[in-house]
Image (cartoon, rainbow, N blue to C red):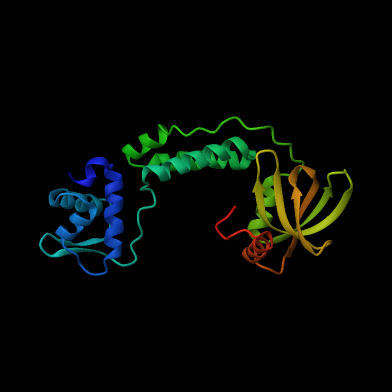
Amino acid sequence: MYRFACMSRSERLLDLLQVLRRHRRPVSGAVLADEIGVSIRTLYRDIASLQAQGAAIEGEPGVGYVLKPGFLLPPLMFPPEEIEALVLGSRWVADRADGHLRDAARNALARIAAVLPPELRDELDASALLVGPGVSIPVDSVDPALLRKAIRTEHKLSLSYRDGAGVGSERVVWPFALAFFDQVRVLLGWCELRQDFRSFRTDRIAHAEALDARYPKRRQALLKQWREIQGISPGGK
């Protein structure tokens, strides 16, 4: 029995594109059909479908097929688990993040759904992965969007901050990451006052102002250095 019997058509087409990417020279339909696990007739139909969707596949039966160099896989072809990841992640953000990110997550998911093939759209709408109710997140005095923008643009931030004991201080920090936990959000940055990495709970930031000055290191370099100090691998959280 052919493997495609337990695969959705979208998965099969995606697999075919992946196989074609591995071959730099024209490859026969028989070889492709064997690698994908489909009949030669199904293989020819799938190639025709991909070509109709804009895939730059050159060749014909009896000659072989090749995917033109530089062709990118269609970004909106997802296997079921990737769709589940997108839905679950968007639902978590919509439930846990601030208003700007919540709306962005919902809009992004709607934008993706609008251009997905019908069968993938059905899988997205029917996703059974749900986000359970979370604990109440403390209300921030500053707009998290300002913090995120400073991180993206690598600009210094001037903070008025209160520690756990309520003692206030003025800081200039180089923000490079924002960590989301169930109960708090934490801004990570290099503190000019302490000359070291520091974390700042966003609900304890009384005031924040983005400065014109950019900090002297790249955000990625700061994050890498912080990870090394914390003993966190590059792929870790």
Left or right: residue 187 versus residue 233 is right
149 or 236: which is nearer to us?
A: 236
Along the horizontal axis of the image, is 233 left or right of 114? right
Q: Position of residue 235 (x, y in %)?
A: 55, 57
Taking the spot 35% from the left edge, 48% from the top edge, the residue there is: 77
Q: Position of residue 87 (x, y in %)?
A: 47, 39
Q: Residue at x 60, y 42 (%)?
A: 101
Q: How many numbered marks does the figure carry? A: 0
Query: Quadrant of the rendered structure where residue 98 is?
Result: top right
Horizontal and vertical percent position of residue 221 = 64, 66
Q: Residue furthest right?
A: 167
Q: Residue at x 69, y 63 (%)?
A: 229
The reply to whether residue 54 is in sight is no
Image coordinates of residue 20 in percent, x first then y, are: 27, 61
The image quadrant of residue 165 is: top right
* Residue at the outermost left position: 62
The image quadrant where one finds the N terminus is top left
